[in-house]
Amino acid sequence: MVIRLFWIFVQKRKFETIHYMMYQSEISLPAFPRGFHLITNIIEKHLPALPQCGMLHLFLKHTSAGLTLNENADPTVRYDLESIMNRIVPEKQQYEHDDEGSDDMPAHAKSTLAGASLLIPVSSGKLNMGTWQGIYLCEFRNRGGSRKLVMTVWSA
Amino acid sequence: MVIRLFWIFVQKRKFETIHYMMYQSEISLPAFPRGFHLITNIIEKHLPALPQCGMLHLFLKHTSAGLTLNENADPTVRYDLESIMNRIVPEKQQYEHDDEGSDDMPAHAKSTLAGASLLIPVSSGKLNMGTWQGIYLCEFRNRGGSRKLVMTVWSA
Amino acid sequence: MVIRLFWIFVQKRKFETIHYMMYQSEISLPAFPRGFHLITNIIEKHLPALPQCGMLHLFLKHTSAGLTLNENADPTVRYDLESIMNRIVPEKQQYEHDDEGSDDMPAHAKSTLAGASLLIPVSSGKLNMGTWQGIYLCEFRNRGGSRKLVMTVWSA
């Protein structure tokens, strides 16, 4: 489900036809199992027509998941990333915040390590990422459920 | 103390009343003890009237502290985060950069791990964060003192 | 080599002389050895004239390197950061993704931990960083080669 929050779009002086705009919408990602997941396609499906020169911001409204950019080809990268993050923030440790299970507090810490938002340049109407870069959802909970994400596109 | 650096605000074609603006100010946070601290209220107190659709950027001008988003309700999350970060970058280790004490080099590393800036969407005149998200100052030094922060708000 | 992608620059109502603009270019960084490197000077050399109030975004188009802000004076900070990151994501570990050598998968993980982009406020025509902040390229591969970076500057 997509809620279009705002669409500000102004056409300026006819002889120049330069557009300023900011577009914002909120989407719900499908529930993913714990792990790292390539979501570039899902994001692109929800994007508006992109400007010739602008920025895309993705913002996850959660504290036990993250967004990151990483390798978009070999699935073993996602597998190894899950193992590495589990080694950096192990579950078999005493935490004060443990009411929701042993995966909860590590998920909060991993969210701070990976970050919950991404800012990507837009050029010639496309996301200007490297050949091997893909957008990852980092699902750090065993059952995180659907995750909400705010996307903002602007040009100047 | 707040230094208002700039306030660019332009009203365009009367019949549309669309505003473009960028607002920037520098604030000083009070000195916090080492640890993770919820500062959403402090940030909101210094914000200008927010646009219907825009972005807020927070930028810490320091290399031994950080900014992150995490759980805004249970204080034990902040307590556990401090323990987790100390385990990831322990002080009882030999560092070349140690003139300012054993907490100094780990603080630099933690700052790179957590990051020193945040970009948050603004929607309907409010910060569009998730229900459980709060803005944290990560104070990685034992005596970090007051920290300077640049906030920038823009709409298009 | 610099490819100027776009230059949108509009002078508005003469009596106010306010400029809205977004500038975007792609640069290639020289090849650096594995480690943390201060690149503030290289970045500044490629910047256009900066606005009175705006933002600079730096975006690395790679998944085995990173960008971060850290201490710009003492080179031992960069040395210690390399050791710390190697301890957090050790190479002597079994990884599924290992076709390109033992430094490859750790490099991907470190890229997610450090992040691949930076957003820095621009004030009074300069980067508004702290006295001790510098821009680092984090080269996580043994032979990463030249790295591509998209820089975007905007004001509103």
Image (cartoon, coloured by chain):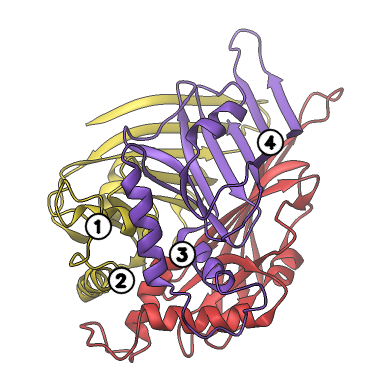
Chain colours: A yellow, B purple, C red
**Residue type pointed to by label 4:** Gln
Q: Chain of mark 1?
A: A
Element under label 3? helix
Mark 1 or 3, closer to the camera: 1
Tag 1 secondary structure:
loop
Within 10 Å of disc 3 (Cα), the crowding (few <14, some 14-19, many 20+) is many
SS class of the residue under badge 2?
A: helix
User: Which residue bears the numbered disc 2?
Assistant: A88
Q: Earlier in the sequence, mark 1 or mark 2?
A: 2
Using the image, determine if residue B82 lies above or below residue C110.
above
How far apart in space, not on screen, are marks 1 and 2 (Cα)?
15 Å
The answer for how far apart the CA atoms under marks 3 and 4 are is 26 Å
Up-down: is B52 above or below B90? above
Q: Residue at x 39, y 43 (%)?
A: A59
- Neighbor class of circle 1 (other Cα within 10 Å; few <14, some 14-19, many 20+) is some
Q: Which mark is residue A95?
A: 1
The amino acid on which the numbered mark 2 sits, given as a three-letter code, is Ile
Residue at x-position 33% and y-position 90%: C102
- The answer for how far apart the CA atoms under marks 1 and 4 are is 39 Å
Residue annotated with mark 3: B113
